[in-house]
Image: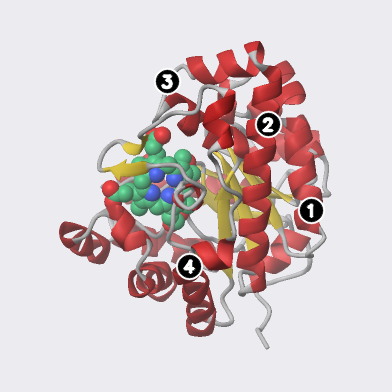
Amino acid sequence: MRGSSRFIEACWGKPHNGIPVWFMRQAGRYQPAYRQLRERYSFLEMALSEKVIVDVTCRPVEELGVDAAILFSDIMIPMGPMGIDFDIQEHKGPVIAHPIRRVQDLKHLKPLRPEDDLPEIFRSIEQICRRIDPIPLIGFAGAPFTLASYLIEGGPSKNYIETKKMMWEQPELWHEVMITLADAVVSHLHAQIRHGVQAVQIFDSWIGALSVEDFEYAVLPTMKEIFSRLNRLHVPTIYFGTGSAALLPLMKQTGARVLSLDWRVSLAKVRQDLGNEMALQGNMDPVLLLSSWDVLARHVRRILDSMAGDPRYIFNLGHGVLPNTNPELLKRLVAMIHDYVPGTNDIGI
Ligand code: 1CP
């Protein structure tokens, strides 16, 4: 049996001691051990090696003292067995050999059969859960919009021109793409939960590119369907986006139990606007980790004071840890959050 964890308790809004903390991209390039391995292996070799997945995932728990681990993987990994030929290039990210633009391109995709297609990942999840117990492991997947943006553009993008054109000019094909990806996301996350992850996060990193109207029409129905299928398994479900301030009321409607926010919004204001049912996660600017400790600590204190006493709050960054971040600073930050004692707060929650 697993013990209780303040991260899981905070997701559900149950009483717990101290503010939970973990970091997006805590398993990755800022870690000296990761960089050493990366000199010898490609990213994809590492992301499919059981030993590497387990080690890179567990280290932040053991070295930084965070309250949750996140699986070392990538949102693109399930796309391989579905028939997408891609590579992950250093300093760039995913590059897709044959972008999806027409109905025929979609016809070649196979449904994901997670345990048969990616056995290394599920064996790793079981090992990780045993090694870090009672600290929980967070599983994840990319959201259909963010995945689609890579598949349609062929790689990282600034203006999402082909993606938006498909969304507007070929709504039926767009719908098919969203449904196909939604099925893969749900089956991948269901399998991760079956093998032991205790919470799941859906990364919609580039959703801020959409207007409120486009999100409501072209993305929201799929996200509602995904969260409704996931919530049946009674594990916390987290929805993350960046640049998404205008979308937050609609992101709440998806049914996600936790919203993960970037640094552009005020947590206390979002709490006020969205009410008390959902947990909130975030939202320190990751660039602060490249500043001096004094500057960093002042900003952290402000965030913690603004959410003091809120049982549904989880400290995190507004986006991933940047590669040049000093691990010692992350460790000190975790300690500061755990040692935090609220003064008086004027939020009243
Ligand atoms: O060269 C290298 O060593 C690869 C760098 C790297 C790493 C360490 C990539 C390529 N992915 C990852 C791991 C990763 N990716 C994790 C690990 C777990 C953790 O958080 O600690 C996670 C959750 C992801 C998810 C991911 N991949 C997202 C969503 C989160 C986010 O940061 O917005 C996205 C958008 C990707 C695509 C991707 N993969 C890699 C890069 C550099 C990118 C971004 C490219 C772009 O700017 O579009």
Disc 1 to disc 4, how far (Cα)? 22 Å
Quick one: label 4, few (<14), some, or many (20+) residues within 10 Å?
many
Q: Name which of mark 4 and mark 3 comes first in the sequence.
A: 4
Using the rendered view, name the quadrant where residue 192 is placed.
Answer: bottom right
**Residue depicted at x 59% and y 17%:** 166
Using the rendered view, name the quadrant where residue 109 is placed.
Answer: top right
Find the residue positioned furthest to the left.
Answer: 39
Measuring from the top left, give residue 138's x and y in whole percent. 57, 63
**Residue depicted at x 53% and y 52%:** 316
255 sits left or right of 110 in the view: right
265 sits left or right of 278 in the view: left
Q: Considering the numbered disc 2 on the image, is that residue within a helix, a strand or a loop?
A: helix
Using the rendered view, name the quadrant where residue 259 is placed.
Answer: top right
Residue nearer the viewer, 192 or 341? 192
Numbered circle sitting on residue 121:
4
Residue located beneath label 2 in the image: 176
Numbered circle sitting on residue 158:
3
Residue located beneath label 1 in the image: 229
Disc 1 to disc 2, how far (Cα)? 18 Å
